[in-house]
Image (cartoon, helix red, strand yellow):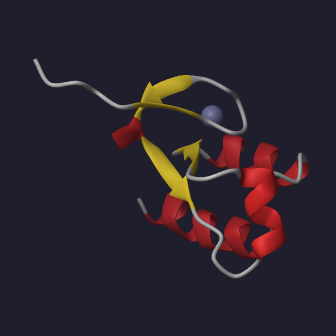
Amino acid sequence: MAHIPIRTCIACNSKKDKKELIRVTNNEKQENNKKLGRGAYICHSIECLEKAYKLKKIDEKNYERLKGIIIDK
Ligand SMILES: [Zn+2]
């Protein structure tokens, strides 16, 4: 059996298969990398996205970008 990488959602803290989460990258703002850490992940849900944004875990650019990805699916 292959090892399944588990990641934690930055909004709801639930642990999920990496494939079920969206990677949050932030290449444009170096400061935010500290907040996010390396390779932050979020659920494929608008609720978690809103929550992460309210908690300032993601910036506006990521919020808009991820919203586009989530709504698109
Ligand atoms: Zn979540």
Q: Is residue 19 above or below residue 38?
A: above
Of residues 34 and 12, the one nearer the viewer is 34
Q: Is residue 61 above or below residue 51?
A: below
Residue 72 % position (x, y): 46, 66
Residue displayed at 61% across by 73% down: 65
Quadrant location of the C terminus? bottom left
Q: Is residue 60 above or below residue 37?
A: below
How many numbered marks does the figure carry? 0
Residue displayed at 56% across by 52% down: 39
Q: Is residue 58 visible?
A: no
Of residues 54 and 58, the one nearer the viewer is 58
Residue 1, image quadrant: top left
Of residues 29 and 51, the one nearer the viewer is 29
Would you say 17 lies left or right of 32 here? left
Would you say 65 lies left or right of 6 here? right
Residue 34 % position (x, y): 79, 56
Residue 19 % position (x, y): 34, 42
Q: Is residue 38 visible?
A: yes
Residue 66, image quadrant: bottom right
